[in-house]
């Protein structure tokens, strides 16, 4: 039985051992635990079920009940995001997901708080003192069920038009552990497969498909119900696994579990990530200046 997760560190935990071709390290900074996993070979990528690249996982205090020390979190997140972005050039920020479904609304809600500056040029920029801002374009992709267009296809069209130097995509993720919901952020330069964590695979969004560097940022907001049941009951027997699958996923209908306070989780996660992205893209501005501009 495949245990679904979007988090690279959880795939490493499932294997239970270090793998040749995957470097792992852990550090503490400002009270936050930062785990780094760099997958450098195809074999390691196959074992970990994640593409080659760098994955940074930051453990935070729960967003639903802890709103203090936000400056520390924002500074740490912005530094990690900034490391993966090119120094110069226009950056396209895209919010992925369905704003009508609360656990999937992280991308759209975050993108709505990112400062778009591509249109601020010339005399307007000089007269308002904003001529040193980095050019940023922002969009929400919606989902294929709303638009009839694959998210990846939509992004490729926008990239051909505005020619950014990098793409930042923000999406809700799936974890295999309840304790990670709302207190984990994953940042990666390996791109993203929208919907993969809940079995709804779409066109992959990464450097090979988009033609530019892709930085993916996400917070786990759901756990696949079958994955959760297998982990809680610690079932390895194949026959018992089949019976459990029938009980948890009747008629093949997959379900996910999300916290009852998911609306608060999404709002605070969107606020935290948007400020972190803004600071990574506009390092000359402090938090108060960014909030004024927004």
Image (cartoon, rainbow, N blue to C red):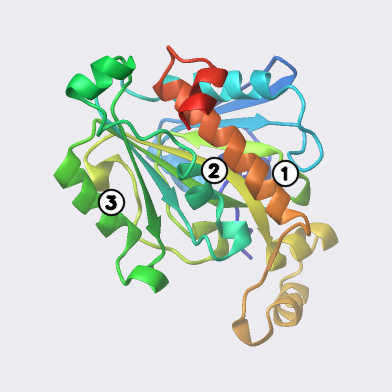
- Disc tally is 3
Counting from the top left corner in percent of width and height, residue 286 is at: 52, 15
Secondary structure state at the residue bearing disc 2:
strand
Q: Residue at x 47, y 35 (%)?
A: 188
Q: CA distance from mark 2 to mark 1?
A: 12 Å
Which residue carries the number 1 mark? 180
* Viewer-nearest of discs 3 and 1: 3
Of the pair 239 and 78, the residue shown nearer to us: 78
Identify the mark at residue 218; answer none if there is no mark: 2
Would you place residue 80 above or below residue 261 in this image? above
Which residue carries the number 3 mark? 155
Q: Earlier in the sequence, mark 3 or mark 2?
A: 3
Question: Looking at the image, can residue 19 be seen?
Answer: no
Residue farthest to the bottom?
A: 251
Counting from the top left corner in percent of width and height, residue 282 is at: 41, 20
Q: Earlier in the sequence, mark 3 or mark 1?
A: 3
Q: Residue at x 71, y 14 (%)?
A: 30
Secondary structure state at the residue bearing disc 3:
helix
Question: Looking at the image, can residue 165 be seen?
Answer: yes
Identify the mark at residue 228; answer none if there is no mark: none
Counting from the top left corner in percent of width and height, residue 262 is at: 71, 55
Q: Residue at x 62, y 80 (%)?
A: 253
Counting from the top left corner in percent of width and height, residue 199 is at: 52, 66
Q: CA distance from mark 3 to mark 1?
A: 29 Å
Secondary structure state at the residue bearing disc 1:
helix
Would you place residue 207 above or below residue 70 in this image? below
Badge 2 crowding class, 10 Å Cα cut-off, few under 14, some 14 to 19, many 20 or more, is: many
């Amino acid at each position: 039985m495949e245990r679904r997760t979007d988090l690279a560190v959880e795939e490493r935990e499932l294997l239970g051992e270090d793998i040749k071709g995957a470097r792992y390290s852990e550090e503490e900074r400002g009270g936050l635990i930062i785990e780094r996993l760099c997958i450098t070979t195809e074999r390691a990528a196959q074992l970990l079920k994640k593409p080659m690249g760098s994955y940074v996982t930051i453990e935070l205090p729960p967003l639903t009940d802890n709103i203090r020390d936000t400056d520390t979190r924002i500074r740490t997140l912005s530094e990690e995001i900034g490391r993966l972005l090119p120094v110069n050039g226009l950056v396209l920020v895209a919010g992925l997901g369905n704003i009508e479904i609360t656990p999937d609304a992280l991308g759209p809600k975050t993108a709505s708080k990112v400062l778009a500056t591509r249109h601020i040029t010339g005399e307007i920029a000089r007269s308002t003192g904003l001529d040193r801002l980095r050019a940023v374009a922002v969009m929400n992709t919606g989902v294929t069920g709303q638009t009839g267009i694959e998210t990846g296809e939509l992004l490729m069209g926008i990239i051909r038009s505005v020619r950014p130097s990098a793409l930042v995509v923000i999406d809700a993720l799936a974890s295999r552990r309840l304790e990670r919901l709302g207190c984990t952020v994953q940042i990666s330069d390996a791109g993203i497969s929208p919907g993969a964590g809940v079995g709804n695979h779409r066109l992959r969004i990464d450097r090979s498909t988009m033609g530019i560097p892709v930085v993916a940022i996400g917070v786990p907001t759901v756990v696949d119900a079958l994955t959760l049941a297998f982990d809680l009951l610690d079932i390895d027997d194949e026959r018992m696994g089949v019976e459990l699958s029938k009980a948890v996923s009747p008629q093949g209908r997959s379900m996910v579990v999300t916290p009852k306070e998911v609306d608060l989780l999404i709002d605070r996660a969107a606020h935290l990530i948007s400020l972190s992205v803004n600071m990574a893209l506009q390092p000359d501005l402090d938090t108060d200046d960014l909030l004024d501009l927004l």
